Structures are given as structure tokens and as C-alpha cells.
Image (spheres, rainbow, N blue to C red):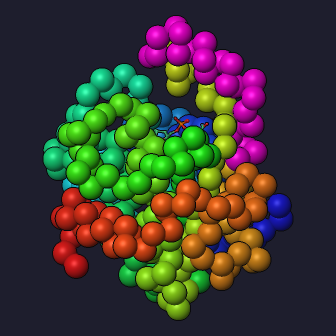
Amino acid sequence: MAYNLDQKTIIVTGANSGIGKAAARQLASLGARVILACRSAERGAQAVAEIQQISSSNKVELMLVDMSSQQSIRQFVGEFIKRFPRLDVLIHNAANFDHTLKKPILTADGVETIFATNHVGVFLMTQLLLDTMKASAPSRIITVASKGLITYPFLDLELDNLNGERKFSTQHAYYHSKLAQVMYTFALAEKLKGSGVTVNCVRVTNVAIPDDRLTHLPGWLRAIYNIKRSMSITPERQAETYVYLAADPAVQSITGGYWDEHNRQVRANKNAYNQDTWKKLWEASQRLAGLSG
Ligand SMILES: NC(=O)c1ccc[n+]([C@@H]2O[C@H](COP(=O)([O-])OP(=O)(O)OC[C@H]3O[C@@H](n4cnc5c(N)ncnc54)[C@H](OP(=O)(O)O)[C@@H]3O)[C@@H](O)[C@H]2O)c1
């Protein structure tokens, strides 16, 4: 990939680990100014140092944000807008898949943590950065879902279960939040047609998770992850799709797409295309994010 991203400013959330870190490294190597949006000062600083060294770039920096906290997101965006005149690409990579959760835990904003992190936080950050992105057009928003949604063909938006009040497991809450990401991508792409801001969603496949991310899990679950790893691709390989969608001229005006790891558009679950549901999700997201219409 030989893109020149010298003039581009890019935010990657959850960039201290896995696919996000690999994408940040690739984008920095192509010359972009890359903001690693991470919740841990320590893990974030370590990633910045590593990426600066490998990419030989001094345009890599850390800004702290906890995607589960609306106050933190508002503070992050306020600081970003003060410091940077433009935003060319926003990559919503961070996600919570915390296997240790046995019941729904509400954030300070009163939203179940997985839905708060993987959907409501994404919605809020995007809405707050939209004016900057419109002023920077052509610009691109990239969201992240999961190939695992294939195993939930009938899953739909659960307006009566957004906080896991009716049923909860990490797995269910995670896939529900990822389905919401796909619907949000399609809905936002429609709304932004003609603005010069595109929105595309990556259908992340089975990607190796490093050992140091699994230490808190019980042995049986680590064993499952080890088996999965033998069938997975590397974070670097999956990050190439992030970079393709962030940089390739061929996708500059393509919006509302759902993309696999071979940079091909694929179909999402049937329910993801229901425009009535998009509207309901939008209204619920506004309400949960404390934004008015
Ligand atoms: N790996 C797979 O097989 C797979 C499959 C399907 C989809 N995906 C998706 O791919 C994306 C990247 O996953 P990955 O495999 O690279 O996982 P990962 O290595 O665990 O990275 C997840 C990143 O998200 C960050 N994060 C989590 N909660 C956050 C919060 N509240 N605020 C800010 N950052 C937060 C983590 O930061 P900390 O270090 O602070 O925890 C970490 O940097 C995610 O959206 C995931 O859902 C992955």
C-alpha cells in the first residue's frame, strides 16, 4: 500500500492494542498524523513510543478517552477541536468484550457498559466531530462490526433490552452492539449523502488476540482462544482493510458499505437493512447520548 497521507489527520480509538494499534502503525508509516484515542495513559504511551519508533514518525500522539463515558468523550472532542483544525478519518475500533461480566453494569450515564462503549459512545463522538469532518471533506468515518454476527441471523435491535434488563450475557450484548454499529453505519451514510463525509463498516473476521490480553480469563476460555488463534489472521492483516477504507482513492466516494478482510463489500444480516429500525436506533441513541434531535 503506497498511499501518501502526509496531510491527513486520523483518530483511531482503542489504538494501544490489536487491530487498532496495527492500523495506527500502518497509517503513521504512510505519513498521517495519528491520534491514538485510548483509555489507559500507560498502555497508550507505550503504544505511541512503539509506533513512533517503527514508523519513524513524530506525528503520533496519545489523547485519553474512555468510550464508555460521555463526559470523557465530550472532553476528548473539546480538546481535539481546540488543537487540530481538521479531521480526515475517524476509526471507531475500540470495543468492550468483557467476558468477566456476569450481569449488566450501568455506566455513570445509566447505560449498560458494552452498549455504552461499542455503540452509544461511537454515536456521541461521531456526532460531536461531524462539523469538523464536514469542514475537512472529503473525509471518512470507519466503524467496526464482527463476522460473528453471521451466527446471529435473526438478531434485531432490542429496544426493550438496551441495558440488558430482559436478558444479558457478554456475548449477546456484544453482538447486539455490533449489529447497532452496522445499522448506524447505514443510517448515517444516508444522512451524510452529499456532504463529502463517507461512512463504512469493517466486518472484522477472526483475528488473533495476544496472550497478554487474555490473562484475566479462566483457563478453559484461554484454551478456546488458543484454538481460535490457529484459525485466525493477524491484527496487521485485518488492519490493512482499515487502511484501505481510510486511504484508497477508489473508495473515496463509496459510503454505507460493509467490508470483509479482502476489501470486498459483503451483505450484513437482513435486519440491518430495515430503515424503520434505523430510525428507532437513531432516536434511542440520541436519547442515551443526551443529544437532542
Ligand atoms: N479479534 C477478533 O477476533 C475480533 C472479531 C470481531 C470483531 N473484532 C473487533 O475488532 C476491534 C478491535 O479488536 P481487537 O481484536 O484488536 O481487540 P483488543 O486487542 O482487545 O483491542 C481493543 C481495544 O479497545 C480498547 N477499549 C476497550 N474499551 C475501551 C473504552 N471504554 N475506552 C477506550 N478504549 C477501549 C482497548 O483498550 P484497553 O487496553 O484499555 O482495554 C483496546 O485498545 C473491536 O471493535 C472488536 O470488537 C475483533
| Of residues 95 and 14, the one drawn nearer to the viewer in this rendering | 95
Asked if residue 104 lies in the magenta stretch, the reply is no
- Tell me: residue 88, above or below residue 241: below
Q: Position of residue 10 (x, y in %)?
A: 55, 64
The quarter in which the C terminus is drawn is: bottom left
Q: Quadrant of residue 168?
A: top left
Answer with left or right where residue 250 lies relative to residue 95.
right
- Tell me: residue 246, above or below residue 232: below
Q: Quadrant of residue 247?
A: bottom right
Q: Residue at the location (49% across, 62% down)?
A: 272
Q: Residue at the location (36% across, 56% down)?
A: 157
Answer with left or right where residue 231 lies relative to residue 148.
right
The secondary structure making up most of the magenta span is helix
Residue 293 seen in the figure: yes
Q: Position of residue 32 (x, y in %)?
A: 64, 64
Q: Position of residue 170 (x, y in %)?
A: 38, 32
Q: How many marks?
A: 0
Q: Residue at the location (75% across, 24% down)?
A: 230
| Of residues 4 and 270, the one drawn nearer to the viewer in this rendering | 270
Q: Residue at the location (25% across, 34% down)?
A: 104
The residue positioned farthest toward the front in the image shown: 154
Residue 64 seen in the figure: no
| Of residues 123 and 29, the one drawn nearer to the viewer in this rendering | 123
The residue positioned farthest toward the bottom in the image shown: 194
The quarter in which the N terminus is drawn is: bottom right
Q: Quadrant of residue 6?
A: bottom right
Q: Position of residue 280 (x, y in %)?
A: 30, 68
| Residue stretch in magenta | 216-238
The residue positioned farthest toward the right in the image shown: 2
- Tell me: residue 192, above or below residue 95: below
Asked if residue 225 lies in the magenta stretch, the reply is yes
